[in-house]
Image (cartoon, rainbow, N blue to C red):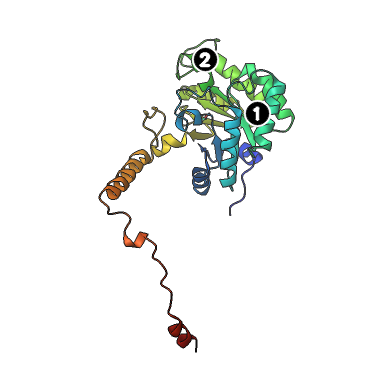
């Protein structure tokens, strides 16, 4: 087995080989992603949308994050395991944030946590990192701010200091790094802005919809596998069509049950015929 990837290993990748990150939410896909050589697995609160079928990530709870993280932790052998802090598990107070980050580590077996927000979350990042729980930041398009943003919209395309504007996003990036995050997700922003942030920060940037100049890339597992019936966002690439493959397989199963061509004799068990006593004695003698 290849050596386990740790937080310092990810930090050292700044400016080096691109970091490959992917979300996973359960044992089978955690095992597949890990075996395929993904460096960092994120148990994202995107599970609210791609696993639970909700429109936003907002309803996801701490208990649900712990439950999914534990499943992926059992599967993961090499990759670094990061778990999202869900909406309102860290915004109320730094003390509550530390307690919830601790739950993800103690109960979920996460090795690091991720939270969304920039300048306004700096104190919280400092508090969590201060008890030696590594923190990954997340700025730009932050799905937990969906109502403020008016939808899942690209951020930083306009100049200005208001939330979601270019100068403010740079401030957010600097604040997250300064507060002690070991890496930062840049989501849904122009590629030149992500490039500028990547140059200015000494911690690795991991992009999603942020162009090719980041230190690594992350995508949502279900987008990569084509395992969703919703639209695929422009920034994602479908490397397989598992939704269609699964639908075809299940339809074939249903057809064969209805036509009685499944199960065959080969899929069936047979009664054991007792060996008559005389034959048994002859065979043993
Ligand atoms: O929840 C998630 O999956 C994420 C990634 C999109 C970065 O935060």
175, 149: nearer the viewer:
149
138, 277: nearer the viewer:
277
Residue 262: quarter of image: bottom left
The residue that mark 1 highlights is: 181
Q: Position of residue 6 (x, y in %)?
A: 64, 42
Marks 2 and 1 close (CB-CB < 8 Å): no
Residue 179 in view in this figure: no
Q: Residue at x 59, y 43 (%)?
A: 73
The residue that mark 2 highlights is: 164
Q: Position of residue 155 (x, y in %)?
A: 48, 18
40, 274: nearer the viewer:
274
Q: Secondary structure at mark 1?
A: loop
Q: Secondary structure at mark 2?
A: loop
* Horizontal side, residue 64 vs residue 134: left or right: left
Q: CA distance from mark 2 to mark 1?
A: 20 Å
Q: Residue at x 32, y 62 (%)?
A: 265
Q: Which residue appears farthest toward the bottom when viewing the image?
A: 285
Q: Return the mark for residue 60.
A: none
Residue 172 in view in this figure: yes
Choose the circle earlier in sequence order: 2 or 1: 2
Q: Residue at x 54, y 32 (%)?
A: 44
Number of callouts in the render? 2
280, 37: nearer the viewer:
280
* Horizontal side, residue 166 vs residue 135: left or right: left
């Amino acid at each position: 087995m290849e050596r386990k990837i740790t937080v310092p290993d990810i930090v050292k990748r700044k400016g080096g080989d691109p970091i490959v990150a992917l979300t996973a939410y359960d044992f089978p896909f955690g095992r597949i992603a890990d075996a395929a050589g993904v460096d960092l697995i994120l148990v994202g609160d995107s599970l609210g949308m791609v696993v639970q079928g909700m429109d936003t990530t907002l309803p996801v709870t701490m208990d649900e994050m712990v439950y999914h993280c534990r499943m992926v932790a059992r599967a993961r052998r090499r990759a670094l395991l990061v778990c999202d802090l869900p909406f309102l598990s860290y915004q109320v107070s730094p003390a509550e944030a530390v307690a919830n980050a601790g739950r993800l580590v103690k109960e979920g077996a996460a090795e690091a946590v991720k939270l969304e927000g920039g300048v306004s979350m700096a104190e919280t990042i400092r508090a969590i990192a201060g008890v030696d729980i590594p923190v990954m930041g997340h700025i730009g398009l932050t799905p937990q701010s969906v109502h403020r943003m008016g939808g899942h919209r690209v951020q930083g395309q306009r100049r200005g200091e208001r939330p979601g504007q270019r100068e403010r996003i740079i401030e957010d990036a600097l604040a997250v790094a300064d507060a002690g995050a070991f890496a930062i997700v840049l989501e849904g922003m122009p590629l030149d802005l992500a490039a500028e942030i990547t140059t200015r920060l000494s911690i690795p940037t991991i992009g999603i919809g942020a162009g090719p100049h980041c230190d690594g890339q992350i995508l949502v597992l279900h987008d990569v596998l084509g395992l969703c019936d919703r639209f695929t966002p422009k920034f994602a690439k479908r490397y397989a069509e598992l939704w269609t493959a699964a639908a075809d397989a299940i339809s074939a199963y249903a057809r064969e049950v209805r036509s009685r061509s499944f199960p065959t004799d080969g899929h069936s068990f047979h009664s054991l015929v007792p060996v008559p006593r005389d034959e048994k004695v002859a065979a043993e003698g």
